[in-house]
Amino acid sequence: MAYMSKPEEEVVQGSKIGGKMKTTENSFYDIIHIQAVNRPDSEAVVMGDVRLTYRDFLDKIDGVASTLLGKGIKRGDKVALWSVATPAWLYSYIGIIRAGGIAILLNANLSAKDARPLVEYADTKYILFGKTHDFEGCAQDIEMISEDLGLDKANCISIIDEDFSNAEIIEPDISGITVHDDAYIIYTSGTTAFPKAVINSQYGLINLSDRLSSELKSLRGERVLIGVPFFHVYALIGIWIYFINGGTVIIPKAIKADIIAGLVEKEDTTDIWSVTVLFQSIIENDELTAKVAQRARICTVAGSYTSPVQFMRFETAFYKSKFINLYGMTETSGAYVFTRPDDDITVRYNTVGRPVEDIEISIWDDARGMLPHDEVGEIITRGFHLKNRYYKLQPEKQAIDKDGWLHSGDLGVFDTDGNLRIVGRIKDLIIKGGENLAPAEIEAQIMSHPSIGSCRVFGYKDRIYGENIGACITLAPGTVFNETELRQYAKEKLGSYKSPVYYFIFDEFPLNSNGKIDQRNLHVEMLRRLHRLQLEDNLEKGIPIITMSVKNSEYNITPVAALFEEAAMNLGFSRKKALVIRQAAEELLVLRINGKTDSIEDIDISLRYYSTFLRITVSDFGDSNDSFGNEQQRMALAIMLKLVDDCEMTRLNSGKYQTSMDFTYDKDFDIADFLLKHEK
């Protein structure tokens, strides 16, 4: 079943004509130019002491475009933009496209080593750079990249040092250029070995922003704080919503809770465009919460899953504000599904809402095609908002099928009113015993417990079910973790089959450069902790390293004892302690072999690692150690008992007599760490 928002009436401005929303052919530059004419002295961009009016902002854009034209930029040339979010980033981004270039929006947190292949892949001709992950080394990074790729150093321009206002203005030749042309490239941060270069147009972003702007009009203010990196489409669509309406974009110096809250207060900002992690950090601090709660009227979240419980916590803390959930991706020019301000609270908590006007969305299954509204499948979409293409990828890898549908890789389901609920990623499904389990469903129930701040669920290999469930959690402020209580709660909410087997507590989750939870690294860390936990469980039972049977011959005493010495040395015992272990093994073997007769069967020998000691065990059908009358045997027993840290002798049900010698590890030695470090 496909859903498409249909207009009910004609509206002149903004708007619906002939059954469809009116679209605009205005470019990025056109929009800023219109505002510079209509409201030249209104603030366009604010960051710290830098406050650019629309007139100033347009001058800077013209300066960037003219600088590039003066250096010989040609239509379609690629220009890398590598900087953290600043006013200079914004006017450089628009200026590149104004000059006819294609802007490559690089992640500012990349190292030179990671940025270089992306610059090369895009066939970059120019680099505009500002402050990056390593401001002190940025110029050296650019020099290294330019030399390595053979770029003209004169075409690598610092957007910090260059005063574009003083550039000699050169009017670009815009004949034949349309807003449907390639405008900018954003590299996806997906799970592929090399990120895809998504090429988008101005048309998709501007028209999507215009529709969102109209839908949010009842709440939207005139000033927005963008708490998202600018190389992310989520930030871009937020920026253009406010530029289209002549509003002000406020840029924080860093995306941190205290800085964001301080700016909300200082700049009297009512609109905040950010991510779940940021809002969560604010509500964990009463002072910061108070600053935001007094002013915020609309807060948007996107880019990562926000549970219903988190939404309730946010709106309870920011009691004058409404939270709007958005869903989209780089390939769709940003958010194209969102909850409306007047939606019922349960819709805004539990879904990401409905698509914007004139965009189709459906749920797909490769085997069955379009699915009914209440079945989970892949989210697919088509419309004006889609990317132009993936740069350099073959048609079969473009993710858009012959009918124009973009296949998202996300799992979702519609309710009866056409609201979309995100279930997870196709690749994130946990397949337990042949049943597909969606992590988002499990996470939502776990997070509904009052002690849980956030939760991410992952699969891990299981010998019985193929995969099973592990949960990474953070605790809500002021709460104490009670695992027994949480397990019972999960069982009641999810049933035993969907309940996590393991829980791993984190102080905070790792974040990627986009400010989103780093799912990949979090999953890896969970698997590391799980591996250690399973290893520690095995150490409690004893991990067998050597298991063998030897003939009851005195010729076996020396080589077997030497084998134990070598094992001890490999484990990290000192040379002195390893020799003690060897001598104790020799004395025990002397005791057992000399106390036996040729008719007795072989001797069973093993060496096991335990959590705090190494154990050597010898068992055979001979007599007990204290029954021997031979002087040599008595002496061997005495020496052995003196050398070991602990010893146990017992007759097994099988009839065998077993002697176990324990040797404790050094005080600072962690056997689990050692094994994890040295395992292959």
Image: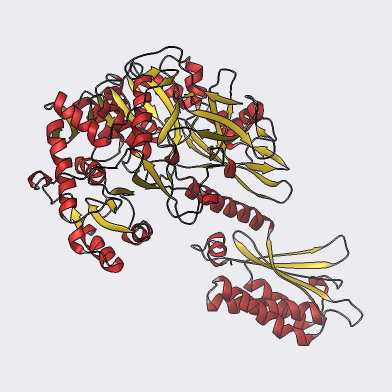
| Position in image of residue 646 (x %, y %) | 65, 65
Q: Nearer the viewer, residue 445 or 356?
A: 356
Using residue 118 as the reference point, say whether residue 568 is left or right of it.
right
Give the total number of marks visible in the rendering: 0
- Please name the residue shown 56% across and 34% down the image: 379
The reply to whether residue 49 is in sight is no
Using residue 225 as the reference point, say whether residue 558 is left or right of it.
right
Q: Is residue 602 above or below residue 3?
A: below
| Position in image of residue 578 (x %, y %) | 58, 76
- Please name the residue shown 73% across and 83% down the image: 557
Q: Quadrant of residue 247?
A: top left
Q: Residue furthest front?
A: 175
| Position in image of residue 301 (x %, y %) | 40, 30
Q: Quadrant of residue 18?
A: top left
- Please name the residue shown 55% across and 21% down the image: 418
Q: Is residue 653 above or below residue 493?
A: below
Q: Residue furthest right?
A: 599
- Please name the residue shown 58% across and 43% down the image: 428
Q: Nearer the viewer, residue 535 or 206?
A: 206
Q: Residue furthest bottom?
A: 555
| Position in image of residue 401 (x %, y %) | 56, 42
The reply to whether residue 601 is in sight is yes
Quarter of the image for the N terminus: give it.
top right
